[in-house]
Image: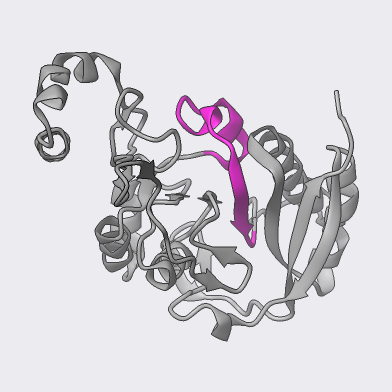
Amino acid sequence: MGILQSVLQNLGNGTDAEENNSARDRNNARYAGNCEYYYRYSDYDEFSYTKTRPVVSENGGKKPPKLTVRWIKHYSSSHRILLVGDGDFSFSACLAVAFGSASNMIATSLDSQNFLMRNYRSASSNLMELKIRECKVMHEIDATEIANHPIIGRMKFDRIVFNFPFAGFFKELSRDAQLLRHRKLVSEFMKSAREIISEGGEIHILHKTNGFHKEWKLESLALSHGLRLIDAVDFNGFDYPGYNTKCGFGGDNNFNCYPSKTYKFRLGYNWN
């Protein structure tokens, strides 16, 4: 808590007006779960959590600063991006490095921070990279409940990304029972994600396309939640330097992620 309060204090020392409003800011602060950053409604942009200071032009008028938009494959620094289920945060870190600044991103995982540190060798360095680049990091976030989260659920995103969703290892269950578990995970994620996707935004699921994984039938799940498939692009890990496809659930080994595709979904029709 000492570090968080120090960050808030440093950010609040810009003007006398800000100092006078410090008590109000503290009252309006929100802190959810293990989010590493405070969310202040008074002084911060709804998504970026960063100070919104206009630029004064030569004629005295105010205009927004010009930003350089950077891209990496399907994602740009102008997108409001939510990443869920990012095992060791290597995919999030890859995007952050490509963008330079990652204040447009929220990166989350289901695991606690302690679990990550114990089980993934690169988790610490990835989290540090995200912190340096001002990405918001949240732990213990259930991808099927993101629309109900007290901070995330208040926002709209241009891209919501879930790479290689996997419900777990259920060797004691039949093939059909395992399939049901995995499809339920994806279905509930889609149901929640559609509530916080922006107009024209996309929900991305990176998924293997062979064997057992073909039977998940992502497109039919999407249709049941009013989403339509707009594209499916072959995945190449070389497009994302530093990204490691971890086995999950504490397994630090990388799994064979080929062949796989990034499935892109948009809202397709009204769904009640």
- Residue 139 shows in the view: yes
> Which residue is at 57% across, 76% downward?
255
Q: Is residue 271 left or right of residue 114?
A: right
Q: Quadrant of the C terminus?
A: top right
> Which residue is at 37% across, 53% downward?
65
Residue 60 location in percent, x, y?
Answer: 29, 42
Instruction: Pick out the residue farthest to the front.
Output: 59
Q: Is residue 260 left or right of residue 247?
A: right
Q: Nearer the viewer, residue 51 or 224?
A: 51
Q: Is residue 144 magenta?
A: yes
How does the figure colour the protein chain or chains?
Answer: one colour
Q: Is residue 271 above or below residue 234?
A: above
> Which residue is at 86% across, 49% downward?
228
Q: Is residue 55 above or below residue 212?
A: above
> Which residue is at 51% across, 61% downward?
248
Residue 52 location in percent, x, y?
Answer: 33, 40
Q: Which residues are magenta?
A: 142-164
Residue 158 location in percent, x, y?
Answer: 62, 48
Number of numbered discs visible in the structure rendering: 0
Q: Is residue 80 left or right of residue 66?
A: right
- Residue 146: image quadrant is top right
- Residue 171 shows in the view: no
Q: Is residue 134 magenta?
A: no
Q: Quadrant of the N terminus?
A: top left
Q: Nearer the viewer, residue 165 or 178?
A: 165
